[in-house]
Amino acid sequence: MDSHRIILHIDMNAFFASVEQQSNPELRGKAIAVIGAAKRTVITTCSYEARAFGVKTGMNSWEARQKCPELIFVVGNNRKYTYTSTQIIAIMREYTPLVEVFSIDEAFLDVTGCLSLFGSAERIAQLIKARIREQFGLTCSVGIAPNKLLAKLASDMQKPDGLTIIAPQEISRILERVPIQDLCGIGHKTGEHLSRFGIRTCGELGRFPVDILKRNFGVTGERLHYMALGIDDSPVVPDEEAEEVKSVGHSTTLEKDLTERREILIYLLQLSEMVGRRARKYRVAGRTVTLTVRYQDFTTFSRQQSRGSFTNNSEEIYQAAVKLLDSVELTQAIRLLGVKISNLRQHTEQLPLFPAERKKALLTSAMDDVNNKFGDFAVTFGSLLGKDAGSKVISPAWRPEGLRNVDVE
Amino acid sequence: MQRFAERIKVAALFAPGCQVRPVWFEWRRQKHAVTEVSYFWKDCHGDATRLHFAVSDGSNLFELMFNASDQNWTLEGVEDN
């Protein structure tokens, strides 16, 4: 491990809710919850004032209202958030080119090489915090540590508007009493499993025999041991160096649970067109089509099928998705649908030889031209006319540019 | 916020550095002086860049949108505070 690295983890505080509070001064200092545009979506995030009442992300609106009767619901505006996030990431990139966007409201920065320019990591953190506050009125919590694992842990220690430093010589003292589930990467299941060995803190995990961990957790066992000691040599990977995107997909929670095939197909066509559009925009085509279905009781499953040829044609993606749907005997109403293409390769435009195929390619290209000029779904399939289409949710994989830059509604 | 999509007349300052600031606007025959621009964001619709402003006239919050492609201003929404 390179013990000289200095990593910052920047976490925007209650990001969507804070943006809404800045947009509407009347909401500042009040308990608010951001919900999706769809009528029934759960709480996306809530302000610190709401959290004080026990309102949490993922809670149903009625449940949240019981916790906090004064709670104000605000319908989120995803484009406002993606714009703000993109601008904030641009600020970070003024201090170091090594910025890894972790999600729309979190990023890691490796500032090891730029300390001589700005003085210290703490000063860089303060400058970035000040710029974000001045430009957007938003606060963030920053963690500074020798690696990503500890930087993330540090940023979580003081919220909102924190700045926490974990110096190399303090690692073991700090980790001694930290609950294992506070470490990024140790989820509920692993935490439960470890607790059966009487392990609750990082100190206990660090002292636990590695061979027993390996026997019970496989390769992860050794990683858990190192995590407990605060050792993490994973690099900060900027987007341009990140692994190639392996799939292009969209999913949507339906406005109401559906059982009617005809209605389900409309959503499948919408999703297929969104997948096809994005794949064509970034010139990739996929050979495998995956359909994801979530029932009303949240049971989720996927079915996939590989085609004989690569495609980014919306209609072909749709046909494959319909085939997958028809291969399943639906036992409940559907709550969520997803369509994805994977097994990607770069797609170079080549007009097909046969007239019917050529016509289809030219039609797709003409539709894309119109939609590029006038916006998505300006020209679309007849069965989608008048339907509210587009991505309503910002995926955790969202990035400010490239194939993962999903245009949201 | 109550959503609208009404073309409106807006007086705006275009300052150096691509800074645009609405000063007043007319909506349904009433003139509203902008007392605060509380938030700004941009997006694209097709090839049109659109500038969005959350503004207050001292009593209500409005969302105004300037389409840089066709140079039109639209009132997008009103929040009665």
Image: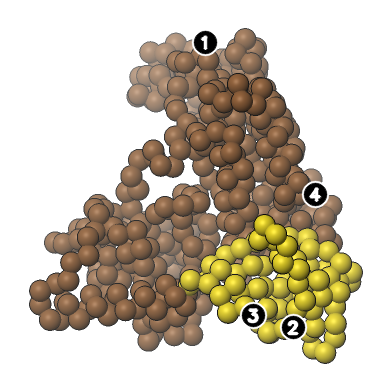
Chain colours: A brown, B yellow
Residue under the point 30% across and 71% down = A314
In the picture of the structure, the residue carrying the numbered disc 2 is B9
Image quadrant where one finds the C terminus of chain B: bottom right
Q: Is residue A63 above or below residue A141?
A: below
Q: Amino acid at mark 3?
A: Asn
Of the two numbered discs 4 and 1 in the rendering, the one whose residue sits closer to the viewer: 4
In the picture of the structure, the residue carrying the numbered disc 1 is A207
* First in residue order: circle 3 vs circle 2: 2
In the picture of the structure, the residue carrying the numbered disc 3 is B72
Q: CA distance from mark 1 to mark 3?
A: 66 Å
* Chain letter of the residue beneath label 3 in the structure image: B
Q: Mark 4: few, some, or many residues within 10 Å (few <14, many ≥20)?
A: some
In the picture of the structure, the residue carrying the numbered disc 4 is A49
Q: Mark 1: few, some, or many residues within 10 Å (few <14, many ≥20)?
A: few
* Chain letter of the residue beneath label 2 in the structure image: B
Q: Residue furthest bottom?
A: B29
Of the two numbered discs 4 and 3 in the rendering, the one whose residue sits closer to the viewer: 3
Residue under the point 32% across and 79% down = A366
Front-most of A97 and A20? A97
**How many discs mark residues in the rendered view?**
4
Q: Is residue A208 above or below residue A254?
A: above
For mark 4, give the secondary structure. helix
Q: Amino acid at mark 2?
A: Lys
Q: Position of residue A235 (x, y in %)?
A: 45, 28
Answer whether labels 1 and 3 touch (C-beta < 8 Å): no
Answer whether labels 4 and 1 touch (C-beta < 8 Å): no
Taking A306 as reference, is A64 left or right? right
Q: Amino acid at mark 1?
A: Arg
